[in-house]
Amino acid sequence: MFAAYNTGVLQGSVKRVQGDASAESGVATGPIICASHGDWVTDDSDVTGGTATNWFMSTQYNSGDYDISTYSYNTSTHALTTVAHFDKAAATSISGSWSQTDGLFGGWAQRSRSGSGYPNDYPSSAQVEAINSNLAGISSGTTTHSTGSGPYNGMQRLADDMLVMVGASGNIQGNYGVKTTDGSSATNGGQNTNSPDNGGTGNWNPRDGSFAEPHLVAVSTGICAIGGGGGTYSNPTHNYDYFYMSFGGSINGQSALADGVSFSWAESTNRINFEVMSWDGTAGGQTRTYNGGVCTAPSHTGSTLAPKVFPTTWGNVIMCHDTGTPANAVCFPVTWSGTTPTAGSSVSWPGGASIPSNELHVDYTIRGGGGNGNKHGSGQHRTDLNKYRTVRQYEVGSTTYFDFVEFEFNYVGGVLYPSVYTTVKQGWSYPKTGVTVRGSIYMKNNTDVFMLFGSIDAGDNTAHEYVYFEGAFSP
């Protein structure tokens, strides 16, 4: 285990983005970066026909509808130019999310309130989509499900050719894998045509018939690819298998779904289970297996922050936090035999109370193998896929600070050796608390990152800022 600091300044410099006013100014909910491409992040060919050398897309909720903005970005002058701003969806009580697979392709899922009454009072749908090459609109492809009364739901990214639709509300829950390579056609892995209640189209993984089935609602803990199967940066799997965690229960090993589990990580919770979704990529081929008692976390008095999972080249890592006593945080290595997990002995998180695991920003796509948003939001190193980059966010008095941090998960001889390193101490700050990170784009040079900060103005909770950091990380 290893932890260290570099208390110096950024190797390069900080570039506040210069350009026209953000199209999302004054929105009710701050924007989220949901797609990116161009030669700042990839050597792949230009997919826009020259519309923008480097670009990204953001989505935001604005008074009853979702809007989308696309931007061109110049990494030399740091000028930001709005390419287009357009409506995505409008409805009453609408919720949804857009995630990118690769390039212009991705998918969207949403739920709204129609007011027409049962059984069509909460229409829910999802589809794969393609951003137009001029970045001025989005074209919808195959609808993967549509039902008159469905769950709050959204698309999450797993790999370059795979999304996962996740949703839960009331007695309607489910998730299913979606395979797409063109943003037009799609293969749905879900099993049962009747899983969306009250008719509709599309297959979901099966419900167990109980209200708010926790084995399915637990997908809110975050999906993750099964590690160790090869892959590349932010593209950890080609076998379409994934898993998520549930908590509690008492039955160990693979079993029928009779164990009483929860999707909430309570102060008294220690038991971690894996809900594994196996899929061969064929329509309706997805199956679900419950793996009870994969590992038991140490006590965490006063801490209810749920564990996080990361894919690696050799398997997965479960990071268990302790917000009350950060030095008690631990990591478990998980190896796989096919789709059956085995957890090894835990080791202490090497950052202890100096680089607390609970202060690391590992939401959205930082973990590289499942999450909301854009492919290049993954903090994985481009060649060392066991290394991750992110920021540590913490507050001192009325100031929010951001350290730039790298951590790595090496596994040798059946033992996990995590390490963590602060590359820049207090590399950025805001003179207020409650600041949020709304998205990141990690550059292909492995050293730079483009970030979106929200809630930066105490007098305006919609205020946000894009900042480019040069030399934040080691090559």
Image: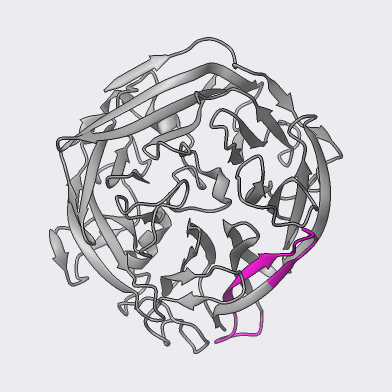
Horizontal side of 394 relative to 66 (left or right) equals: left
As for residue 147 lying within the magenta part, the answer is no
Where's residue 234, x and y in %?
47, 48
Mark yes or no: residue 398 visible: no
Q: Residue at x 60, y 17 (%)?
A: 10
Where's residue 190, x and y in %?
40, 77
Where's residue 276, x and y in %?
29, 63
Q: Which residue of the protein is positioned furthest toward the right in this rendering?
A: 20
Horizontal side of 410 relative to 401 (left or right) equals: left
Q: Residue at x 50, y 63 (%)?
A: 161
User: Dividing the picture into quarters, in which one does residue 360 lie?
Assistant: top left
Please count the marks in the image. 0
Mark yes or no: residue 395 visible: yes
286 vs 214, nearest the viewer: 286
Q: Main secondary structure of the magenta part?
A: loop
As for residue 118 lying within the magenta part, the answer is yes
Q: Which residues are magenta?
A: 115-139
